């Protein structure tokens, strides 16, 4: 990265890394989820949504 600009490859790597990290952390997020209701699946839902977006992004290559 130079001059505060991400290349496409850098953005792709950042999104992939974020999806991987959120997938690994989903249970921890589920455990602290209390708003708006303590349904215990917010982390899982976030991980699934980001993973799906990431998979679609990677399919464009």
Image: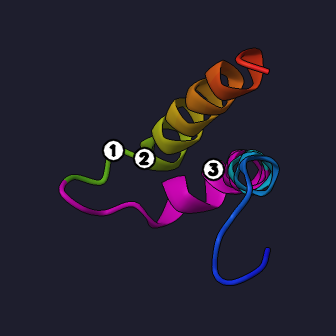
Is 31 rendered above or below residue 55? below
Quadrant of the image containing the N terminus: bottom right
Residue wearing tag 1: 39
Residue 24 sits inside the magenta stretch: yes
Magenta region, residue range: 17-36
Could you give the CA–CA distance between mark 3 and mark 2, rounded to whole angstroms? 8 Å
Secondary structure at badge 3 equals helix
Is 47 rendered above or below residue 15? above
Secondary structure at badge 2 equals helix
Q: Which is nearer the eye, 21 or 26? A: 21
Residue wearing tag 2: 42
Chief secondary structure of the magenta portion: helix
Query: Residue 26 — which label?
Result: 3
| Horizontal side of residue 10 vs 6, given as left or right | right
- x and y, in percent, of residue 16 in the image: 76, 45
| Horizontal side of residue 34 vs 2, given as left or right | left
Q: Residue at x 79, y 21 (%)?
A: 61
- x and y, in percent, of residue 27 in the image: 64, 51
| Horizontal side of residue 20 vs 28, given as left or right | right
């Amino acid at each position: 990265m130079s001059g505060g600009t991400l290349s496409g490859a850098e953005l792709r790597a950042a999104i992939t890394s974020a999806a991987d990290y959120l997938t690994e952390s989903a249970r921890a997020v589920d455990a602290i989820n209390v708003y708006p209701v303590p349904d215990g699946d917010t982390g899982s839902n976030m991980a699934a949504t980001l993973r799906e977006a990431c998979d679609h992004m990677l399919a464009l290559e």
